[in-house]
């Protein structure tokens, strides 16, 4: 009835006479207190309700929202949102998303495209959705995607892809989500993802570049930092391409999450500056 501005609740409401005496408001009051009683949402607490695939899918959707919110918080404006249908044979395990999967952001002369579950083919398919990457070999680490090793049947599907455009060429950051701990990410996932996205993926145009990859993981405690996979370095030497591990979950506040993403984007900017000097 009344057009009242909404505002987020950071704590349970106070037990005012209206909440206590009016039946409808009393029911809302009870539900709000029940909600805050749950505490910080943790997928792991509800793991018995979901399969591993369900939890992974929820975490991927959670991160998609976070990445979009982060770009907007840093002054980027969503200029275009669309759902691309990637052409794939029926025998492939890949299924197109049901939701928009391509988000174009702009800020001044800068343009960043966030892709959700894109397809990287084994040939130049830029006409499909403007992605200038391709899988450069047919070596199989596993049969997870039903690859046969034959030309035209090899592809990769990262969870996210960031394309940062400039007049000197486009730069790509490949991101993958794992609802796992840092130790398990290092033990079970880094090798395969590095092989796929740092060794077996190339740019179509010589002026473009793959800045690196980042694995976003969700089983983390508060204050876990962004860290590089490269844990052995020599003074004055920066290793490229990037290979980063980024913890992102509700254990951190939104400000702390933003700061971690700032650190990742700062590394991207330094990597770009180093390439220019070379």
Image: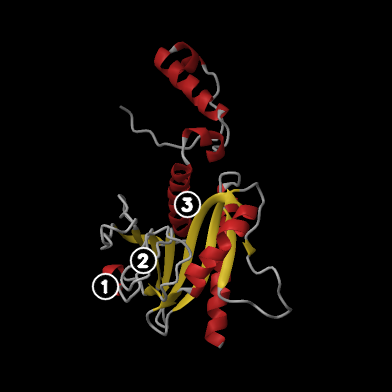
Please name the residue that numbered disc 3 is placed on: 63
Q: Are marks 1 and 2 in contact (CB under 8 Å)?
A: no
**Which label is found at residue 260?**
none
Sooner in the amino-acid sequence: mark 2 or mark 3 = 3
Q: Is residue 79 above or below residue 19?
A: below
Sooner in the amino-acid sequence: mark 1 or mark 3 = 3
Quarter holding the N terminus is: top left
Of residues 269 and 89, the one nearer the viewer is 89
Residue at position x 46%, y 56% in the image: 67
Which residue occupies the extreme right position in the image?
235
Q: Which image quarter: residue 183?
A: bottom right
Residue 97 in picture, x, y percent from top left: 32, 53
Please name the residue that numbered disc 1 is placed on: 127
Please name the residue that numbered disc 2 is placed on: 148
The nearer-to-camera label among 2 and 3 is: 2
Residue 91 in picture, x, y percent from top left: 29, 58
Q: CA distance from mark 1 to mark 3?
A: 27 Å
- Picture mark count: 3
Secondary element at image label 2? loop
Q: Which image quarter: residue 108?
A: bottom left
Residue at position x 48%, y 65% in the image: 141
Q: Is residue 72 above or below residue 222?
A: below
Residue 164 in picture, x, y percent from top left: 43, 71
């Amino acid at each position: 009835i009344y057009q009242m501005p909404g505002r987020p609740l950071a704590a349970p409401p106070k037990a005012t006479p209206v909440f206590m005496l009016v039946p409808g408001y009393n029911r809302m009051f009870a539900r709000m207190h029940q909600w805050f009683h749950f505490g910080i949402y943790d997928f792991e607490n509800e793991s018995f309700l979901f399969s591993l695939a369900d939890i992974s899918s929820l975490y991927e959707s959670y991160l998609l929202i976070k990445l979009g919110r982060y770009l907007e918080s840093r002054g980027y404006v969503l200029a275009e949102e669309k759902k691309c249908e990637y052409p794939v044979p029926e025998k492939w395990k890949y299924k197109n998303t049901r939701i928009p999967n391509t988000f174009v952001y702009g800020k001044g002369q800068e343009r960043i495209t966030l892709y959700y579950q894109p397809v990287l083919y084994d040939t130049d398919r830029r006409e499909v959705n403007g992605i200038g990457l391709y899988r450069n070999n047919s070596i199989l680490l596993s049969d997870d995607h039903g690859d046969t090793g034959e030309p035209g049947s090899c592809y990769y599907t990262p969870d996210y892809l960031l394309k940062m455009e400039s007049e000197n060429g486009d730069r790509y950051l490949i991101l993958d989500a794992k609802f796992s701990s840092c130790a398990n990410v290092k033990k079970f996932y880094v090798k395969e993802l590095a092989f796929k996205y740092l060794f077996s993926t190339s740019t179509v145009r010589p002026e473009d570049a793959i800045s690196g990859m980042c694995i976003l993981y969700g089983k983390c405690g508060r204050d876990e930092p962004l860290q590089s996979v490269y844990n052995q370095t020599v003074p004055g030497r920066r290793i490229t391409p990037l290979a980063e591990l980024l913890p992102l979950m509700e254990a951190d506040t939104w400000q702390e999450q933003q700061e971690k993403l700032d650190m990742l984007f700062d590394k991207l900017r330094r990597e770009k500056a180093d390439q220019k000097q070379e």
